Amino acid sequence: MRELADITPVKWDNGKIAWINQTRLPWEEEWKVSESIEELASAIESLEIRGAPAIGVAAAYGIALSAANQSEAGSMKDNVLACYGRLRKTRPTAVNLFWALDRMLSKFRSLEASDAPAVEIREKLLKEAMAIHSEDIGANKQMGRYGNGLIKDGDTILTHCNAGALATGGWGTSYGIIRTAWQSGKDIRVIATHTAPLYQGARLTMWELKRDGIPAKLITDNMAAYAMKDENVSMVLLGADRILLNGTVANKIGTYGLAILAKHHKIPFYVAAPTSTIDPKGRKIPIEQRKPDEVRNILGKLQITVRDADVLNPAFDITPSRLVSAIITEKGIATKPYMESLAAMK
Ligand code: MRU
């Protein structure tokens, strides 16, 4: 079996939350440790912690943290509710955040209703957050096994953004499938897009690919059509921030364009995500609009346009289900009609 360099991007660390600062990768591996909910919220907003499942795991630890050291039921409740409210406001698109916060709040409410003592509530909330974390890693590995069945020896896989260990509890969703295929001995190669404007593909996916030793080529986002036409791309495989039951996918800006290009070139377009990314009630997906300076300047450093240029900066786009060949979850591979296949998994 080939060796892989795994990473756990968010951890519970002795009463505190620790995370690798993803805005500093690939230049340095900086770990931050905090017991402040405000610092955790800012870390999610600034993308120090990012990727739908990783945000969910971090939020779950946030609720556990907000209950820690509270010996009175009343102050514990105030803290938990304040944390829940603050973290819900950090990022609007990835549904894993709301899913994890709701699961933690309902655990808190059921413990409160059973008149459990404060010490037991604290312990059980932490246990729940750890369960969310380990279930995510388990789901990723299961997705890897299912998704590996779609990959052949010699395939070239085009991916976008970062849906690796960094974006999850550990291992990765779509990148986890690539790792599973590589580990099982298949000789594959990856084409990773830059993923402007914050370069999650160039900075983070290439960092993971290099650590894992998987052959990869980096392209700018506007080279994708060229790659599909002339570089023998076997499939597009990427993650998701929110999936509706009808198969509509919200993912990193640029995903929709890749889906259209894949359709034109008759290349399968696969999305991988745990069922915690499926929004069973959603109709309209809120798209996060980020600061204009992310587009005006390269990573806050080099200004690349006129001062105060008016810009658009949606962080995500929506891909209609007709462009999605299949959705890989930990419960299996969903195909059209998604309304039936995804509903059966949720
Ligand atoms: O803005 P980001 O970096 O949080 O966006 C992340 C993505 O769009 C990922 O592709 C998605 O969350 C899937 S991660 C397993």
Image (tube, rainbow, N blue to C red):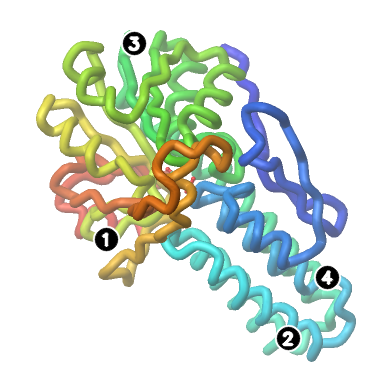
Disc 1 vs disc 4: Cβ atoms closer than 8 Å?
Answer: no
- Where residue 169 sits in the image (x, y, percent)? 60, 45
Mark 3: secondary structure: loop
Name above or below for residue 150 compared with residue 213. below
Which of the two labelled residues, at mark 4 and mark 3, occupies the earlier sequence position? 4
Q: Nearer the viewer, residue 55 or 109?
A: 55
Q: Is residue 333 left or right of residue 6?
A: left
Q: Nearer the viewer, residue 248 or 253?
A: 253
Please tell me in which quadrant of the rendered image residue 70 appears.
Answer: bottom right
The alpha-carbon separation of the residues under discs 4 and 3 comes to 49 Å
Q: Amino acid at mark 4?
A: Ala
Q: Quadrant where the N terminus lies?
A: top right
Disc 3 vs disc 2: Cβ atoms closer than 8 Å?
Answer: no
Which of the two labelled residues, at mark 1 and mark 4, occupies the earlier sequence position? 4
The alpha-carbon separation of the residues under discs 1 and 4 comes to 36 Å
Q: Quadrant where the C terminus lies?
A: bottom left
Mark 2: secondary structure: helix
Q: Which residue is mark 2?
A: 78
Q: Which residue is mark 1?
A: 245
Q: Amino acid at mark 3?
A: Asp
- Where residue 196 sits in the image (x, y, percent)? 41, 37
Residue at 31 percent of width and 14 percent of height: 155
Name above or below for residue 327 compared with residue 187. below
The alpha-carbon separation of the residues under discs 4 and 2 comes to 12 Å
Q: Which residue is mark 4?
A: 68
